[in-house]
Image (cartoon, grey):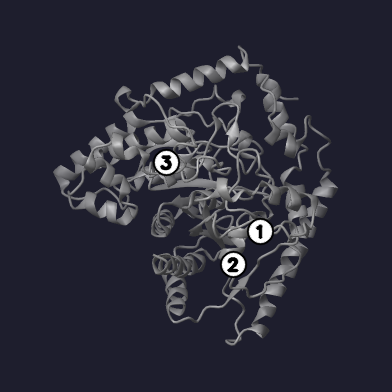
Amino acid sequence: MSNLKALPKDWKSIVLSKREALFARIPEAWRLSSVPAANELRDAVHFPRQFMSERAYDITETLDARALLDKIASGHYTAYEVVEAFCHRAAIAQQVVNCLTEINFEDALARARELDDYFRVHERTIGPLHGLPVSLKDQFRVKGTNAALGLVSFIDAVDTSETESFLVKELRDLGAIIYVKTTVPTAVSHIDCHNNVTGQTYSPVNRFMSSGGSSGGEGALIAMHGSIIGIGTDIGASTRLPAAVNGIYGIRPSHGRLPYLGVRELIVGNTSAPFVPGPLGAKLSNIQMMTEAILGRKPWIHDPRVAEMPWRVSEYEDIHERGKHGDLVFGILTFDGGVMPQPPILRALKEVVNWAPPAHTDGSKIMTELFVADGGAKIHEAHTRSGEPPNSLVTGIFGKTAIEPMSLADFFDVNERRYRYQQAYTEYWNSTARLTKSGRPVDAVILPTFPGSSFRPGDGLYYDYTAIVNLLDYTAAIVPWSHVDKNKDLLNFDYKAATTVDRLIHSHYDPEIFDGAPVALQIMGRRFQEERVLAVAKVIDELAYLGAHSRL
């Protein structure tokens, strides 16, 4: 029996109050009189420029976090003006693409003043992230805010300092400043970013498109330069897809590499399909810097699920050095057997070295079983409590009502099948040593993140290209590669769909509407290979940069 009590008023009134309270936290001087429609302003990334001072705008255009921190440490910028600039741009982003769930501008600016006072007195910073604004996905518990997970029934719970997520406290000790939390789909359970509390979040790069999910607010905010670095979570696609569809960088580390202690989720205890925290950033270097900073705090001392594994410089340098000399071998997957990528993604993957592992469709079935093991009981219980109706994103995965949960015997069986699949995949990866000139297995695999470059709200139907990483508990990073070009990425009228879903997803693609949307690559390494994957991602990122400039 549930101990949750019914909420005192109807869910629409609760939502209205929440939205009004959120809007009230935007300073009046930062409120926009109107926002152009998507057909008038498709790409809104630089829309804030007209509303900001030149200096504030320049601060938010400094996409490398280390460069920004150096300017704070040298006294070129104060922490206050940096935080204020990102608060202003985040406020504009919220009004344009609807990406925030919580606004902490006043607390953030007060903390920035404290850091500036400390710097003036001591002439040094308090930590490696001194004055750095960091945005967080809604799941992270922050004092004085909700972690509602896009559910009406969770709006009434306000976190205290005792309930703050461990990672939030660590970020504060490092000198970072928390100023906003960002949108998620209902119960953080979909690759689109819509819920009944905040509504739909859009990509600022192409406002016809969804921001992806479940860390969709993070992806949209960072893409619009309202944040330089943020922390999301990933259970099947949730950091990587928002990174890909918004043209930024993201990583899904292996379970137990970064601390998750105290992060809120609806279904607790399912360590067979766990969330993991993952940084998203405007630059790849920001993700590396954040990962190093967190590991430098030795989080395994406090979070028993974190492996005692400091940042391994030698692993990173070895891969990056080999990459500079062309001594890396990639496997490339262009089709997982379920849904063929759309023309823009195939163009990015035209250098094909065949990767033919155990069928990804088999692995995806196992992952889906683990994801819905409770039969949808928790999510439907939360909806019943508030009277909030489940939207189509919820019913598409969990049904209109809860079903019989998986039995303990079946749960054991699906976990054993997962282990056998992991074994088979490991053996295949090892076998690629026979195919390479070096005699080493491939260093990493390049594959799509999603069959398309992006998708319109409501069209996010397939996450198997990312979920396979979660099933294997591998590490994967996202690197932006190019953008959809309506003149190059034409419809393929000759394509014969492999499945009904394949046919449906291909029908969603429209070169005119998708024009300008980001195209990204997913780089997959093995378990606990965060350093190696980030090093490979840097090599790919440099190639993307050279390719873009060679086309100018």
Q: Relative to the observer, which residue lies in front, 242 or 163?
A: 242
Marks 3 and 2, the one that precedes in the sequence: 3
- Please report contact status of discs 1 and 2: CB closer than 8 Å, yes or no: yes
Q: Position of residue 274 (x, y in %)?
A: 64, 48
Marks 1 and 2, the one that precedes in the sequence: 1
Circle 3 SS class: loop
Q: Relative to the observer, which residue lies in front, 543 or 82?
A: 543
Does residue 439 sit above or below 112 in this rendering?
Answer: below
Q: Position of residue 257 (x, y in %)?
A: 53, 57
- Labelled disc at residue 341: 1
Q: CA distance from mark 3 to mark 1?
A: 26 Å
Horizontally, is 107 left or right of 539 in the view? Answer: left
Residue type highlighted by circle 2: Leu
Local crowd at mark 3 within 10 Å, few (<14), some, or many (≥20)?
many
- Please report contact status of discs 3 and 1: CB closer than 8 Å, yes or no: no
Marks 3 and 1, the one that precedes in the sequence: 3
Identify residue for label 3: 44
